[in-house]
Structures are given as C-alpha cells and as structure tokens.
Image: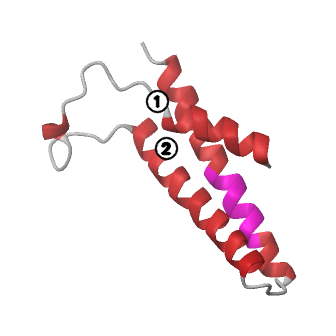
Amino acid sequence: MTISGALGFYLGIDTPPLVSYDPSKIGAHGKADIAELLSAVGTFIAALAAFASISIIVLRDDAHRLATILILLGWLVGVTMQTIAGAIARTRQ
C-alpha cells in the first residue's frame, strides 16, 4: 500500500499543466482539465482514507470489517485516480 500510495502521489501531484491552460476560462464557458480534477479528487479521497486509518490506530478502536473494507476501497480509488491523472497529463501533446 505504501508503494502504490507513493506512486499515485508522485504521478498525481506532479502533473504537467496544459499548454493552453487559461484559468479564466474555467466555469460556464470553458472545461476543467480532467487530469487536474482526477488528481485533486484522488488526493482528497486517499487523504480521507489515510485519516480514517490513522484515527482508528490513534484511538485504539477496533475497526469493523466494513470500515476496513471502506478504508481499503477509498485508498485504492484515490491512488488509482491519481495514477490515471498522472498518465493522462504525461501523454498529452
């Protein structure tokens, strides 16, 4: 999990910007960059999963099986979104 998290964090956080990116065009008249959106949402989901995991450890709580599965799924979804965002950003021309 640590290696996949580090890979997703590196690929998702360090995305090269669009060449013709204009922040004033985001909104009703423009499109948001999908790589940046996936990176931001993936980072948020992975951070929530990490926070939930650490809070269970710090509070010495016994996590139910459902909570463990939800944390695992949150982590995997977040890291996968970050990795996809990095791949999209690096393959554009």
Q: Quadrant of residue 83?
A: top right
Residue identified by numbered label 1: 15
Q: Nearer the viewer, residue 24 or 7?
A: 7
**Amino acid type for the residue under numbered disc 2:** Ser
The part of the chain drawn in magenta is 70-78
Percent x, y of residue 70? 73, 71
Sequence order check, earlier mark of 2 and 1: 1
In the image, residue 59 lies in the stretch drawn in magenta: no
Say which residue appears at 49% left-offset and 45% top-offset.
38
Q: Which mark is residue 50?
A: none
61 with respect to 32 (left or right): right
Q: Secondary structure at mark 1?
A: loop
Percent x, y of residue 87? 58, 27
How many neighbours does mark 1 have within 10 angstroms: few (below 14), some (14-19), or many (20 or more)?
some
Say which residue appears at 66% left-offset and 54% top-offset.
77
Numbered marks: total: 2
50 with respect to 31 (left or right): right
Q: Nearer the viewer, residue 17 or 26?
A: 17
Q: Is 36 situated above or below 44?
A: above
Residue identified by numbered label 2: 39
Say which residue appears at 24% left-offset and 21% top-offset.
20
Q: Residue furthest front?
A: 58
**Labels 2 and 1 touching (C-beta < 8 A):** yes
Q: Is 48 situated above or below 13?
A: below
Q: Quadrant of residue 82?
A: top right
Mark 2 to mark 1: distance in Å? Answer: 8 Å
11 with respect to 62 (left or right): left
